[in-house]
Amino acid sequence: MFAANNRRHFLKHAAGLSAIPLLANTSQAGAHQHRAMVVWLAHTIITPLTQGRVFDRALISEVLAKRRIDEKFLAGVFARCADHGFDTVYIAPRYVGKAFYHSKVVASFDRMYGDEGLILADVLQRFDPYDVSVREAKRRGLKVFAQTSLFDHWFPGLEDRYYEQHPELLMVDRKGQRLYYQGVPCYAEQGAQDYCLAEIKELVERGAEGISFEMDSHQSEWWPPGYGDRFPDSFGFNPPLVEEFQRRYGVNVLKEDFDRQKWYALHGEFFTRFLRRVKNELKDKSLVVGVTPEGFLAYGANASRVVSFGYASQAPACRINLEWRKWLEEGTVDGVRLYVADPYAIAIAEAMKRECKEGKFYFSIQKVDPAELRRLRDRLRDSTLDGYVVHEEAHFDANPALWKALL
């Protein structure tokens, strides 16, 4: 939980969002709320099989010999979601930089990721987890969103092959040393946009009724080895952004001092253009995008204060402002998911919703214990928000008490 001073910071921020007091108007709460479970296929399979035990060869052999994952297993996952009040599932078929389905766009998961990779590779070789999940979810009456992470494309053993081949589409360093920030694409680059669009087109053609963009990343506080001392505003200097800044303000950001706030805003403008292209591709299908109450994304930060993701984002190497009001007002996105780690932050989410009359506002729940989940569930039912999204990273199948907390 946040320290008291961080709670005050967030409440002050929320008060600045709207002149309306932060007290929720429970009479406006909707009769039906969007209740979604994020089913990250790789974790959903691994966690209940190992029951929290440390991986070793003996355990892997036991699982492969006695508890082979089949289509019936995934049917049970979505049956539990439906039986516990969820109306939507966000199926995440990507394991960082690798596809955990038979993709023609993203390089498929292989056996590179340690011993647990043997279990996952075995599943992937026998059937397609994504196709089966879509089918079983719909059979239970659940709406299906495909979820992909926009800024989480690198982890040892889970590297995205496309960005290995095209590192110039990642965030570029300012000094011109041909350094690229691992795992964090620049969506001002046409190639990065094209790759993402090809992925979501494939997921939609195979049954997704909407797309969810996850913004969390292994790179939130990561600094690539061998890159020297970390310092703020050191990455994200890709040619489209550099050229537009000079055209607009007459400043070469590679050689001259520049207005940081204008630079963060320009990143946000280009990101909005990318989202418009996504929505045009999706047409009538829904797009939900994660946002932070601070109103920006930050990667490569110093570990000096805790914020929304539960990571550090002070003095980041790359910052992208989020024009979430514009997205909702112009219909570029249908809803936003609020990443907030503090229990008081439901009030912040409600203040953001009051400020913007268009679109849906969902509260994102990640790692919680059963008592906290029950408390959040009750509080959210009485809130003015449009629903909530629970991430299975809380490891529901390894902790049955979490399921019980939802009843």
Image (cartoon, grey):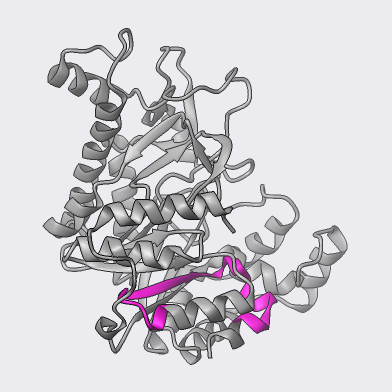
Q: In this view, does 330 lie to the left or right of 50?
A: left
Please say whether residue 287 is visible from this viewpoint: no
Residue 81: x %, y % from top left = 49, 84
Identify the image quadrant of the N terminus: bottom right
Q: Which of 206 and 347 is in front in this view?
A: 347
Q: Which of 393 and 385 is in front in this view?
A: 385
In percent of the image, x 25 and y 52: which residue is there? 324
In the image, is residue 397 part of the stretch drawn in magenta? yes
Residue 104: x %, y % from top left = 40, 53
Q: Is residue 78 left or right of residue 404?
A: left
In the image, is residue 282 part of the stretch drawn in magenta? no
Q: Residue furthest top?
A: 255
Residue 324 drawn above or below residue 212? above
Q: Nearer the viewer, residue 180 or 305?
A: 305
Residue 291: x %, y % from top left = 36, 54
Residue range of the region highlighted in magenta in the rendering: 380-402
